[in-house]
Image (cartoon, rainbow, N blue to C red):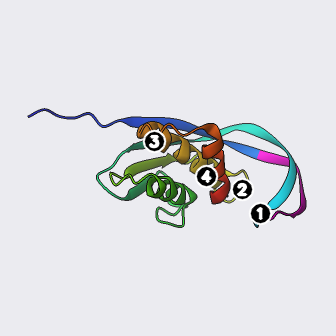
Amino acid sequence: MAMSMRKNIILKAPAKVNLTLDVKGKRSDGYHELETVMHQVNLLDIIRISQGTGGIQIKSNSSLIPTNEENLAYQAAEMILGEYAHKEGVEIYIEKNIPVGAGLAGGSTDAAAVIQGINQLYDLGLEEEELLEMAARIG
């Protein structure tokens, strides 16, 4: 019996800090127009994504992050898998190095990495503009 190799994607999800952040007003899509100066810092989470057997499973080295639909990475996976009808699911491991709740965008950067990773994992061929639009919907 032949064993199949599961495809794995490993991505770095860097932290960032806002040096300035001005809210300019509300846009027609409900989001706020922002003007910001941000800087990437030398701190990152490692996201490992592999093909699953169905559904979304999140594990982490940190007990401080949720592993259910409250997690932004879970929401990102649910959105991209739902829109592109992949029933195989994913297994996501978040090696958490960005402090939780520190305002360094750890959850958002993890979600963005998951969107990018699932695009690669399932060879969806989505363009950068589509990936950015999905990330904006997550937050």
Spatial CA span between label 2 and label 4 = 24 Å
**Left-right relation of 17 to 23:** left
Secondary structure category for the residue under label 1: loop
Spatial CA span between label 1 and label 3 = 30 Å
Q: In percent of the image, x 50 and y 48: which residue is there?
A: 94
Res. 99 in view? no
**Left-right relation of 14 to 56:** right
- The quadrant holding residue 121 is top left
Q: Which residues are magenta?
A: 17-28
Residue 61 has which mark?
A: none
| Magenta stretch contains residue 79 | no
Secondary structure category for the residue under label 3: strand
- Number of marks in the rendered image: 4
Q: Can you tell which of label 2 and label 1 is closer to the viewer? A: 1
Which numbered disc flags the more N-terminal residue, 1 or 4?
A: 1
Spatial CA span between label 1 and label 4 = 13 Å
> Which residue has dot 3 on it?
48
Q: In percent of the image, x 39 and y 50: which residue is there?
A: 90
Spatial CA span between label 4 and label 3 = 20 Å
Q: Can you tell which of label 3 and label 2 is closer to the viewer? A: 3
> Which residue has dot 4 on it?
134
> Which residue has dot 1 on it?
31
Q: Amino acid at mark 4?
A: Met
Spatial CA span between label 3 and label 2 = 22 Å
Q: Amino acid at mark 2?
A: Ala
Secondary structure category for the residue under label 2: loop
Q: Can you tell which of label 2 and label 4 is closer to the viewer? A: 4
Q: In percent of the image, x 34 and y 55: which residue is there?
A: 87
**Left-right relation of 6 to 114:** left
